[in-house]
Image (tube, rainbow, N blue to C red):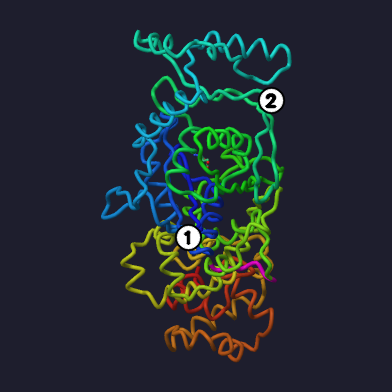
Amino acid sequence: MTVRVRFAPSPTGWLHIGGLRTALFNYLYARKHGGSFILRIEDTDRTRYVEGAIENLIEALHWSGLDFDEGPKIIDGALQQVGDRGPYIQSERLELYKKYVDQLIASGHAYYCFCTKERLDDIRKEREVKGLVPKYDGFCRSVPQEEAKKRIEAGEPYVVRMKLPAGEDITFQDLVRGKITINTDDMDDQVLLKSDGFPTYHMAVVVDDHLMGVTHIVRGEEWLPSTPKHVYLYQALGWEKPTYVHLPTVLNKDRKKLSKRQGDVSVEDFKSAGYLPEALVNYLALLGWSPDKEDEFMTLEEMVELFDFDRVSKTGGIFDVEKLNWVNAHYIRHLENGELLDRAKPFMVEALGYSMEEIEERREYYEIMMEAFKENAATLKVLADKCKLFSPGPVTYEEDTKEWLESEDLPTLKEAIIELLDEGDMTLERAGTFMKELKEKTGIKGKNLFMPVRSLLTGAAHGPEFHHVLYLLGKDEILRRVKG
Ligand code: GLU
């Protein structure tokens, strides 16, 4: 069997990182088994549709490195669909859903329902008072099909509902959660076709997964309660059901579902905060999956190699931004300076107000700046902000520099720096030996030498290595800061 999996987001906004984790696990499984990874857009809820969201989803997946084989892609700036099981956008498949809804009605697995909103509200309230879960009372089940057709022709609004048999067990196997059984008496006659002619998610998802040949449904556990309805539809349509895999929800530290209210949750947010895609993807892989590996750092290829649903847990992965920062810092630290500069450039333009061209013209200089800060930067944004240290302008002195700025050695050091710089420029080579020169000239050494000079030049008691500070500030800026 060739594995076919799909990621099926609704275009209701930016891609949530929980969604990216789902996409990732689908991707890993497809690649591991030489299968296909499909992107399908589930846009049947027109009230929640957001303009531009499809393009954003595609872009976010591309940025994350999760390339898919079939689905809508942006080619030469235009949205095009790739693959022979399309269209991959549900609103373009309405005829197909209609066909299968008709089939379900004909076979007695579904029925027309004419109940008004008022009536449905009354039923809901009545059940609420009795402490029961909301459920349709089956009132329209008994409307004969002939009569229903006449009412439809007369223009009466209607929906189509699934007709669940009484007292039947629906069973399916989930690769993470094991065997799940639910009785139809505990289920609702789910609406399949809405009054606007659009299918509900439940109808569309089953038709599409079947027609697109999806073998494994890998999605968030919030869809678990819907699965028995889907299994019923597979049975009613005479189709073989796929294998189900429900992934644990991505939670915040309070073990609640990660939501926008707590801060960044979309892939876009993390991209613009300066996280590297490989770091974000590596971190997300660990939310709910524990690979059999000593350390936690993995390229996508390594993840593909190691991935299996066996080691996906039932309980939620806790999203911990501190840990993500740690992973991101690791990736930043291990990038070549040139590569890091390319990635950091947009953030530096933003933070320093330079143009891309200015940075390109002094590429070597800025690569050394990357070297100076890359040991200790959680994000590209933090890294770019740190680079402000070398921009001409007034220095702000941190509290703990005070004692060093009051050092009795400082006047001597200042004078010596001015004299030494008079003798020559601050080349990269000289930056490496300058403090030695200064020590020899003044006889001041150790902390008493380094701390006052560092405090004076950078406004901080800690920071990049000295030779970087000196070279990156350069002669003119050092003199300006020394002369105050
Ligand atoms: N359209 C659903 C969503 O937005 C997909 C659910 C599924 O994968 O079946 O998450």
Q: From this view, report whether residue 317 is shown above or below residue 278.
A: above
- Element class at badge 1: loop
Residue at the extreme right? 131
In magenta stretch: residue 34: no
Residue position for label 2? 167
Magenta span: predominant SS is loop
Residue 284 in percent (x, y) is at 59, 56
How many numbered marks, from 0 up? 2
Say which mark, if any, is on residue 35.
1
Which segment is the magenta one?
294-299
Q: Amino acid at mark 1?
A: Gly
Q: From this view, report whether residue 86 is shown above or below residue 397.
A: above
Residue 170 in percent (x, y) is at 65, 35
Q: From this view, report whether residue 128 is shown above or below residue 185.
A: above
Q: Quadrant of residue 378?
A: bottom right
Residue 324 in percent (x, y) is at 61, 58
Q: Does residue 47 appear in this view?
A: no
